[in-house]
Amino acid sequence: MARLFHVPLSPFCRKVRLVLAEKKIEVELVEERYWEGSMEFLRRNPAGKVPVLRLDGQTMAESTAICEYVEETRPEPPLLPRDPAQRYEVRRLVGWFDDKFHNEVTSKLLYERVNKKITGEGYPDSRSVKAGARAIKFHLDYMAWLLDRRRWLAGDVMTLADFAAAAHLSSLDYISDVDWNRQSVVKDWYAKIKSRPAFRSILADQIPGFRPPPHYADLDF
């Protein structure tokens, strides 16, 4: 069985979990306190980050590299289109959420509100939280612009881009930091993707000291 060293609310870990579940790959989830910098974990990934996946006799790090390895070795159901231009668009949007969205929103909301408490780094920086709350509005509007023109974020079929976005938004939704009333098309997209069987384990996550809102695991909001 595959083994994933993860943190439950990490969007990068959640992206990998969604891909594995969509591909119906059984995986053992092992919570990793990566911030403690244990030598055992650093031997798995000298970068000291999660996720780390043990699969096919290999130990792999970096979420996008992991997801593309899984896609190439388990191509069904496909999460990357065959057309090069469409594959580019998927990769562009994965980069958007894992870089721009992460830096402007996730790191300023989730990390300030949750990670600092869990890792003992102190109290949230109110300026960062306010900046994240402002920035997420722009990102939700951009998603709505895409979804007004496409069935899914990168085109007419669900792809890794949707899982990357859903991984970030689901982490933020756990702490009630997503205004689902801002863009109905984004809310409908999220309801559709979180209804997939691949989402079940994520919606069942419980973080000690943090309770999700009632709608978090409600497939109909």
Image (cartoon, grey):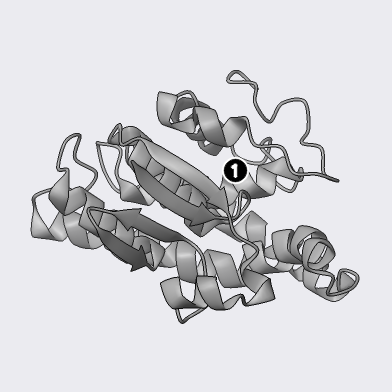
Q: Residue furthest front?
A: 40
Circle 1 SS class: helix
Q: Which residue is found at the position 60% from the left and 39% from the top?
A: 183
Q: Which residue is found at the position 33% from the left and 34% from the top?
A: 22
Q: Quadrant of the C terminus?
A: top right
Image position of 181 (left or right of 208): left
- Can you say whether 142 is above or below 49 in the image? above
Q: Residue furthest top?
A: 220
**In the depicted view, which residue is nearer to us: 182 or 203?**
203
Q: Which residue lies furthest to the bottom in this view?
A: 46
Task: State the residue position of label 1.
Answer: 170
Q: Where is residue 97 in the image (x, y as percent from the top left)?
A: 47, 61
Is residue 151 among the parts visible in the rendering?
no
Image position of 46 (left or right of 220): left
Is residue 82 among the parts visible in the rendering?
yes
Q: Where on the picture, by quarter, is residue 79?
A: top left
**In the depicted view, which residue is nearer to us: 154 or 212?**
212
Q: Position of residue 199 (x, y in %)?
A: 48, 32
Q: Where on the picture, by quarter, is residue 1?
A: top left
**In the depicted view, which residue is nearer to us: 31 or 111?**
31
Q: Which residue is found at the position 74% from the left and 63% from the top?
A: 115
Is the residue marked by circle 1 packed among few (<14), some (14-19), or many (20+) residues within 10 Å? many
- Can you say whether 16 is above or below 84 in the image? above
Q: Position of residue 96 (x, y in %)?
A: 43, 65
**In the depicted view, which residue is nearer to us: 193 or 74?**
74
Q: Which residue is found at the position 37% from the left and 59% from the top?
A: 93
- Can you say whether 197 is above or below 99 in the image? above
Q: Where is residue 148 in the image (x, y as percent from the top left)?
A: 41, 40
Q: Which amino acid does label 1 sit on?
A: Ser
